[in-house]
Amino acid sequence: MSKFIFTATALLILSLTSLSQTEIPTIDTMEFQKGYPYLKNDALTQLKNYPSPRYLLNNNFLRLYNWMSPYYAGGAGQPGIKIPDGIKRGAEIQEELALNWNYNLVISNPRIAPDERALADPNNALSTFINLANKHPEMPLSVTIFWTQIRPDLFGGEHYEPNIMRNDYPESYYLKDARINKIKRVISYAAPDSIFIEDGMVQKKQLQLLVKHLTRPINIINENGEEPPKSYKEKILENDELLIKDKNKMKIDSWDIYTATKKKYIRHLYSSQFMDGIPQLKNTLFTIYQVEAGPVDHFDWNTSKAMCSKIKGNYYSTPDFYPRTPDNWKNRKGAWHGWKWINDGRKIEIAAGDKFFSPYVAAGWATNPEEDMRPAQWLGLLKCLSVVGAEFYYTGYFNLKQPYSKPEDYIWQAAMPAYAQAIATHYTDVFKNGNVLFDEDGKPIITYPVDDDDVIVTVRKQNNKEQYIIAATVQPSSNKEKYPLHKNIEIKIGGESIIINARRQGSVYYFDKTQKPYVFYQLDRWHQYEHPNRWRKEMIYEAEVMDTASTNVSIQTNYTTIYDKTYFKDFETFISLNKKQWVGYTLYSRDIEHLNDNIYIMIYAKSNLNIDGIISINEKQLPFISDKNNNWHWIKVLVTKADFDSSKTSLLKIISTSDNLLIDKIIISDNAVPDLMGY
């Protein structure tokens, strides 16, 4: 008996010991805002305290489209938030996104105020957002409309729902399946034109009311585009006598081409009522959600793309990239699309000559933010989207039911597309005048081959030069398991085997093979894996990632080549300035505001001479002298906040007054010894 007790006790102790040594998976709180899950900055405060995205000034990239509801982002629907306060805060968030994050202003649905009386209601968001748009005529304005939500009865019609959603038409108005039965009373491709024209006229009346109160133009109207009929397989349609008759009349052999042609025609009947019928919209672009070449349930791309306006002479597809959860980044779960959806669709679109696109993006909208992708994983994916042609994003978040998600838990999703797009502006030439690479059969390479299942690599090349942009991200599949934050990977570019470092938040590299030694540098090294609320406040600039410069500034890279491999995982790139040459870097006042009054400008430099140089901030010039010992060292110049332009930006120029000044990086900090841990 005593022996049994001893054995059981020993087993219990062993079991407890094993449990204590087993690590229970938990979230990394560094991927959440400071104080999570208790003390939290509100959404607007967070945005204002995130580091600026650092766009290249005077770039010609289209602005981001805000598909997040400003109403809910402002706190509407949250306990203790009054409706007028939520609307006001939503307008403030819109303004912050437009001024500092390269977003359009947005009116998310003109239906929310169908008449003059509603517009005069202080609890109606539309009048507030109209006033904001009129306040900033210099900012592009976008308007989101929803065909399936129009209200004909509010404009003299007899019905509450739009024609396209009604179920009381004659049987001939609806699609039939292979058993000659109605498909849930879905409107037919061959339904009378009048149905769609009348819906367009209702939308026209709504937009006319909006235009009446605007004192500036609308730049983009975007239709949600989820109205029936959707794309159906041939076996569902081939026994519908009316469709067969209509298809034969149009002399179209393919069901895919027939349905795409009819869908385009139906949408044109609807949209032309307001796009052509309202004079103030003559220069307005019209886009539609999910006009794309995705692998299933889509209309023929070459036919359907003309549903949308051309943008700068190009058709931009509008796929949705909504992985939602960390484990869905690679493939897809039902309606939630991961990377493979983009890979398959972009192959078709680029092969058709459409090298740019504008995806709808959202990292997840769970009530519990721990279920959504985290900032670093999402940022890495967005950078890869940029390299395969995403010029701008429709940034979405969806508040579907109560309790609504807290804006402070998801507002970071507005910042990540801006960080990704801002990096793309620094490779504008390769983006605008380049494309993805193509394989031996002439097919586009969207996902560049790499021997690691957890890494995505995308590559873009300048059309006429061996200049490449490489984006690489290492992707986790859980917010609770321990996954590496970075990996060294090998890829082959232009016949060259190179080793690079892929980070979770993405690593974007510029690789210039037109020079020997090669020039190789990272455009986004300052990005961190943590939640942007935790990013460091000092500003660190790689000298070669300049905003402006005098002519012929030399860029040089030190790297290692062993046998047939070039190692860019441990490289250093710097610039070389001769007499009177200069480089310039944009400093944003909102970043300077986060520092104390005394600020150090630190230049990591090297020279074999006593080189005189000048730091110029706006109109103020500060001389400096480099050491002459030919070693890398820090040059520190003390300035104050008063030396910077408090209105928006300052230009920091570094001017060399002698030859052979080498510069590696620049730091702007209120600490003479900044923390460079992990940089």
Image (cartoon, rainbow, N blue to C red):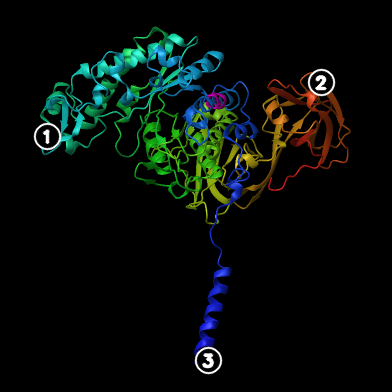
- In this view, the residue in front, 142 or 294, is 142
User: At numbered mark 1, what does the secondary structure look like: helix, strand or loop?
Assistant: loop
Q: Is residue 92 magenta?
A: yes
Does residue 569 appear left or right of residue 442 in this picture? right
- Read off the residue under disc 1: 239
Kindly indicate whether the residue at mark 1 contacts the one at mark 2 (C-beta within 8 angstroms): no
Q: Which mark is residue 2?
A: 3
Quadrant for residue 439, please give it.
top left
In terms of secondary structure, what is the magenta stretch mainly? helix
User: At numbered mark 2, what does the secondary structure look like: helix, strand or loop?
Assistant: strand
Does residue 228 appear left or right of residue 391 in this picture? left
User: At numbered mark 3, what does the secondary structure look like: helix, strand or loop?
Assistant: helix
* Residue 112 percent coordinates (x, y): 40, 21
> Are there few (<14), some (14-19), or many (20+) residues within 10 Å of tag 2?
few
Q: Which mark is residue 374?
A: none
Quadrant for residue 601, please give it.
top right
Kindly indicate whether the residue at mark 1 contacts the one at mark 3 (C-beta within 8 angstroms): no
Q: Which residues are magenta?
A: 88-93
Q: CA separation, marks 3 and 1?
A: 82 Å
Q: CA separation, marks 3 and 2?
A: 88 Å
Q: CA separation, marks 2 and 1?
A: 78 Å
Kindly indicate whether the residue at mark 2 contacts the one at mark 3 (C-beta within 8 angstroms): no
Q: Which mark is residue 620?
A: 2
